[in-house]
Amino acid sequence: MMIKEKIISLIDGFTIELSPKVRHKLKSIPLDKKNNIYITYLPDASENDILETVDFVSKNNLTPITHLPARTMKNLDHVSQFLSQVRERTDSKKILVIGGGGNQLGQISSSLEILNSGILEEYNFDEIGIAGHPEGSPDISQETIDNFLNDKFALTKSKGLNLELVTQFFFDAKPFIDWCDSLIEKKITIPVRVGFPGPASFKTLLNFGLMSGVGNSINFLKKNSSKVTDLLTKTSNDEMLISLAEYAYMKNPLKSFHCFPFGGFEKTCLWLNEIQNGDFIVENQRLMLHKKIF
């Protein structure tokens, strides 16, 4: 298979992230029905904003995947209340259950408590995303991350949960590939949706990277900063995309693609559409789109 076909195969059925703040600026969403939208729920967000965003995505005939941040929830009753409100607005069976940023606001300390509770099944959420941390996390120790992942994998067997690992973004493919290989070694057979930073300026990427504390990737960005002639020009990480597409073609957990639209939501949708539709060529490790988007 040629590299172009491998890239299309990885990107096909991509998902993208939308925040309530950005939703207020949109009139419509330029995506195909097969492309689902993750709706972020940050610690400072209002629940009403989240629900309005779910509604907006549904009314655009697209499938919302709502973030459910465990540590933001007061207790399991609050989770139940929130899910019933989401359910009123969409019949999407998909949800992303995460620990969430910021401090613990209520009685729930981890996503595992929600996964164990049976509440998701009660509201008919049976395609469940969980967080993958290829480069660790600034908030949790590596040992805790590993233990949680083992416990969640055990739930796929004991409770028959249908899980997918959705990863944090990064800027260098190698730590991610090593992480996927380590899942194979540990016999953890949860499929992986890779989190990819969409085209953005070097300055924007560095800021997001520093905020989320993606370890090795930040060093990679700093090392490569000398090659960047303009910190404000938006560029896409084509070399990394090609590496991931090559890797996905082999037998491993990497199955799907998720994009963080750091360079703007609508433009990133259009960029992804072009690639999904095969409207590009690959030249010298670069994707040349037929239409200029960024």
Image (cartoon, rainbow, N blue to C red):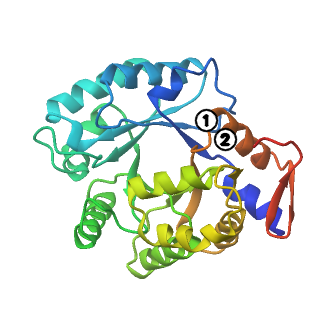
Q: How many marks?
A: 2
Apparent side of residue 228 relative to residue 76 in the rendered image (left or right): right
Residue drawn at 48 percent across, 67 percent down = 218
Label 1's element?
A: helix
* Residue 85 screen position, x and y as percent: 32, 20
Q: Residues within 10 Å of mark 1 (few under 14, many from 20)?
A: many
* Residue 207 screen position, x and y as percent: 48, 52
| Foreground pick, 178 / 221 | 221
Q: Looking at numbered disc 2 in the image, what kind of residue is underneath it?
A: Thr
Residue drawn at 68 percent across, 53 percent down = 11
Apparent side of residue 49 relative to residue 113 in the rendered image (left or right): right
Q: Which mark is residue 268?
A: 2
Q: Is residue 231 above or below residue 247?
A: above
Q: Is residue 34 above or below residue 55?
A: below
| Foreground pick, 212 / 249 | 212
Q: What residue is shown with label 1?
A: 265
Give the residue furthest to the bottom: 185
Apparent side of residue 85 relative to residue 118 in the rendered image (left or right): right
Query: Which quadrant is home to the N terminus?
Result: bottom right
Real-space CA distance between mark 1 and mark 2, rounded to the nearest whole angstrom? 5 Å
Label 2's element?
A: helix
Marks 1,2: beta carbons within 8 A: yes
Q: Is residue 220 above or below residue 121?
A: below
* Residue 174 screen position, x and y as percent: 55, 76
Q: Looking at numbered disc 1 in the image, what kind of residue is underneath it?
A: Phe
- Say which quarter of the image contains residue 62: top right
* Residue 47 screen position, x and y as percent: 31, 24
Residue drawn at 29 percent across, 37 percent down = 43
Q: Which mark is residue 132?
A: none
State whether residue 87 appears in this view.
Answer: no
Q: Is residue 20 above or below residue 229?
A: above
Query: Which quadrant is home to the C terminus?
Result: top right
